[in-house]
Amino acid sequence: MLLLTLPFFCCCTQAQVKSPKTIQFTQAWVWEYENNTIAQNEPGHKGEIVVYFEPKQNYWLFTAEAYGTSGEMYDWIIGKPDGTYLLSSTDEFGKKAITKQQLPFPANKILPQHYKPLGKKKVFNHNKLGFPKIEGTEFKVDYTKTNDRTSVFVSDFKADFFPVYFFNHLNIEAKLPFSFPTDFPKNKLLLQEVSIVNKAKLQLTLKEISHTEYYIELKTE
């Protein structure tokens, strides 16, 4: 169990601090990735992306387990379904602060037409960690101006994945080592992506979903 206690500062006014607000993240989502455009033993070549989830409010929590050393100044980042991100950072003098960024999320309702169904099914989340297996459907991405190839397995899921999919659009140093698609509807779960880019293979696969207890405590105004 991890507990982070950080002060919350209003960017506009200084107000008297009241009781803290605790956000409990109860799920851990793990994707495995491998990027052969990056040399072996180099950061970003192979590893896991771990993101924590609070399903009642649909909040996603990103830590160094997700963005690695690319955002060393950030203690954690929370992404909300309205496009708001809270970013907790510590500067070189040990001063802590929480800032906010806002991203415009699209209103995608269906997969775009360049995703062509292949009719193949595949099951993911094979474990005994308290969550059911997830069946995905395979689609081929129809590129018209490149020889790159991509296929994905996707599934409908009762969650909003835009805070994950758009994370790398934040104007910060912290980046996920694999870029998720941003043309999906918000409730389409990316289970696997396999791409061939300049003859190099890139792959992302949902490894597992598990129960956890991860607390972030914010002092509210």
Image (cartoon, rainbow, N blue to C red):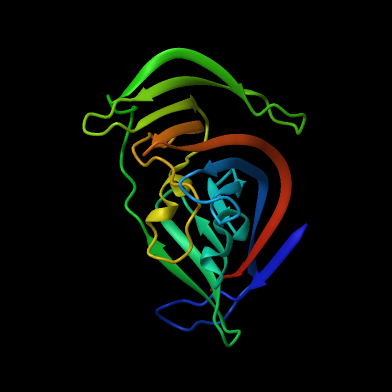
Q: Is residue 153 above or below residue 44?
A: above
Count all numbered tags in the image, as a single digit. Answer: 0
The quarter of the displayed image where residue 108 is located: top left
Tell me which residue sits at (45%, 28%) in the image: 152
Instruction: From the top left corner, tell me how far across and down residue 117 is, in percent.
Output: 38, 17
Residue 216, above or below 219: above
In the picture as drawn, the residue positioned furthest to the bottom comes out as 93
Q: Residue at x 45, y 60 (%)?
A: 85
Q: Position of residue 3 (x, y in %)?
A: 73, 64
Query: Quadrant of residue 64 in the image?
Result: bottom right
Image check: 37 left or right of 211? left
Q: Position of residue 186 (x, y in %)?
A: 41, 37
Q: Quadrant of the N terminus?
A: bottom right
Residue occupying image coordinates x 56% and y 70%: 72
Query: In terms of depth relative to the viewer, which is nearer, 66 or 161?
Result: 66
* Along the viewing direction, whichever of 4 and 37 lies nearer the viewer: 37
Q: Is residue 129 above or below residue 74?
A: above
Seen from the viewer's position, the closer of residues 139 and 36 is 36
Q: Residue furthest top?
A: 119
Task: Say which quarter of the image contains residue 220.
Answer: bottom right
Q: Position of residue 130 (x, y in %)?
A: 74, 31
> In this orientation, which residue lies closer to the viewer: 39 or 142?
39
Q: Residue at x 48, y 13 (%)?
A: 120
Query: Residue extending furthest left?
Result: 145
